[in-house]
Amino acid sequence: NNVDPGNILWIVPNEAWITARENIGSCMEFLHECTNALKDNKDNKSRDDVVTSNEFFQRGFLEWEKQGKIYRFDKDILPTKFKDATLSKSELAMIQKVKRVVRSGRVERIDDDGTLHFNDGTSLSLPWPSSSASDTLFVHCSAGAFNYSKQTKKPPPVFTPHRISIQDVYGTPGFCFVGSILGKLESLNGKLTDAEKNAMCLTPSPDAAQAALPLGPSGGDIGVISKDHGYVQRLCNLRKWLEVPEVREWLVGHRLFNLRHCTAAEIDSLVEETWDVLKELNIVSGAK
């Protein structure tokens, strides 16, 4: 709305990778990129060092940055978060006009006079001589979206008698696809038991530490690859869906599926190549 960038103070608690609107990839293609980078091992690091740190994913992000699939706000800072926020190049350029950027962690509190107190122990007065808290708009937009709630209890199974508890069984592209795949599985009620359907619906568990944060749950830490990582869960779910002929036929080319541009053979290749690497790392197990 034509706000002067000089009148904006931007608090950046954590640096994040940004999805490029012009060239959006998928979670499965990204995980495949990470496993390819591990196989290529251009810097000759040991596999153990890579897979026990966030470098497994960072290598994938850096490759995607070269391909124009993701951006970062500052080329000199390696992001530590990814929440799948999406910007075009023009939107990114607009945001980069804001030059008052503070990287002191999250805001713990704001005094009546507008003084900001950060979780690193520092504080900052409003930078405009004529401003006060009464004529300053404070916008809180650092909380997470999907899977970030104050709920700390383990959710029930997705499928139980006479009930479906909708949960994040695939993540991006989000709720529409998740709703459709759960509906498809339910339509096979005579062919699949609830236990069989739940076995192909792994979901993230609530993070009690995130739920306790005073400004609300966040998330998006790049983290370390593991069997419980959301991307690995999605791979496991997708692999099992593809084993069910009715689901496979429905899934390939589905307009809500983020691999709809791939043929069945291409999807199989991507999934199995990724699976084989993760199996070598003892992150997943089981044969086709």
Image (cartoon, helix red, strand yellow):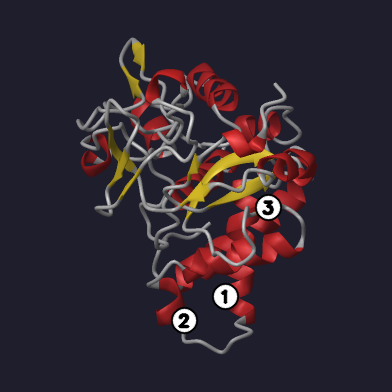
Q: Nearer the viewer, residue 9 or 135?
A: 135
Residue type, numbered disc 2? Arg
Viewer-nearest of labels 1 and 3? 3
Q: Which residue is mark 2?
A: 47
Q: Which of pointers 1 and 3 lies earlier in the amino acid sequence?
A: 1
Query: Residue most toward the bottom?
Result: 44
Contact, mark 1 vs mark 2 (Cβ under 8 Å): yes
Residue type, numbered disc 3? Ile
Q: CA distance from mark 3 to mark 2?
A: 25 Å
Q: CA distance from mark 1 to mark 2?
A: 7 Å
Q: Nearer the viewer, residue 113 or 287?
A: 113
Which mark is on residue 70? 3
Q: CA distance from mark 1 to mark 3?
A: 19 Å
Residue type, numbered disc 1? Leu
Q: Quadrant of residue 59?
A: bottom right
Q: Which residue is mark 1?
A: 38
Q: Residue at x 20, y 36 (%)?
A: 212
Q: Position of residue 148 (x, y in %)?
A: 36, 33
Other-residue count near label 3 (Cα within 10 Å), few / some / many at <14 / 14–19 / ≥20? many
